[in-house]
Image (tube, coloured by chain):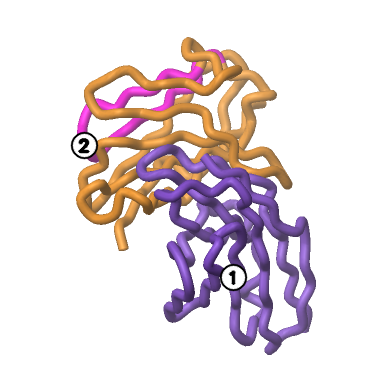
Chain colours: A purple, B orange
Amino acid sequence: LAKTTQPISMDSYEGQEVNITCSHNNIATNDYITWYQQFPSQGPRFIIQGYKTKVTNEVASLFIPADRKSSTLSLPRVSLSDTAVYYCLAPSGNTPLVFGKGTRLSVIA
Amino acid sequence: GAVVSQHPSRVICKSGTSVKIECRSLDFQATTMFWYRQFPKQSLMLMATSNEGSKATYEQGVEKDKFLINHASLTLSTLTVTSAHPEDSSFYICSALDREWDPNEQYFGPGTRLTVT
């Protein structure tokens, strides 16, 4: 199970693009990179998952370089409602997810 | 996407009593469910892995006699906190795997806030 490291906190103004980078130096060949979002007193919500290069959905983009030792979650034009904790994980198949401390994003008006 | 529910969403109980928390997969069959605990301002901590029809696997430091887990069907797992104490007050979250859809994606329930007085 790859260990992940990400910034503890980030601040951003509304309307800006936010990029949160996560390092996972010992990621295994079969590991996917997955990001979750968690609001206070709620369960984590799946945002995006990728294996390599770039993945985009209606919520975010995920950039993964060729060596896969890091990944960047990109949130376009954040709003106040994007204030949350964002977790980067690299699960192996159907193993339980082990959460790190996550990145606490604060969006300021 | 798949939906996981938890019941109750909040519960307050007296010290020494037991509390049962239910985790249900509403539109898929979950052969594996996980139970997490989260204290304020902290990350989720895995407590145990629950497989349908077999005994749960507990993480180190989690008392299996205190946190009873039952996964009797493919859509329901329960966590019973026995003889609860104030230090058991926490946010309990379950997640479920839908192996037929995506073995890499886990779906989380909304959580249960337990307060022991």
Chain ID, mark 1: A
Decide if residue B112 is in sight here.
no
Q: Characterize the local packing of mark 1: few (<14), some (14-19) or many (20 or more) Cα atoms within 10 angstroms.
A: many
Q: Say which mark, if any, is on residue A83.
A: none
Q: Secondary structure at mark 2?
A: loop
* Quarter that holds the C terminus of chain A: bottom right
Q: Is residue B74 left or right of residue A26?
A: left
Q: Residue at horizontal 70%, vertical 56%?
A: A6
Range of the magenta residues? B67-83
Chain ID, mark 2: B
Q: CA distance from mark 2 to mark 1?
A: 33 Å
Q: Amino acid at mark 1?
A: Leu
B69 w.r.t. A9: above or below: above
Q: Secondary structure at mark 1?
A: strand
Q: Amino acid at mark 2?
A: Leu
Q: Residue at horizontal 60%, vertical 76%?
A: A74
Closer to the camera in the image, B49 or A30: A30
Q: Say which mark, if any, is on residue A73.
A: 1
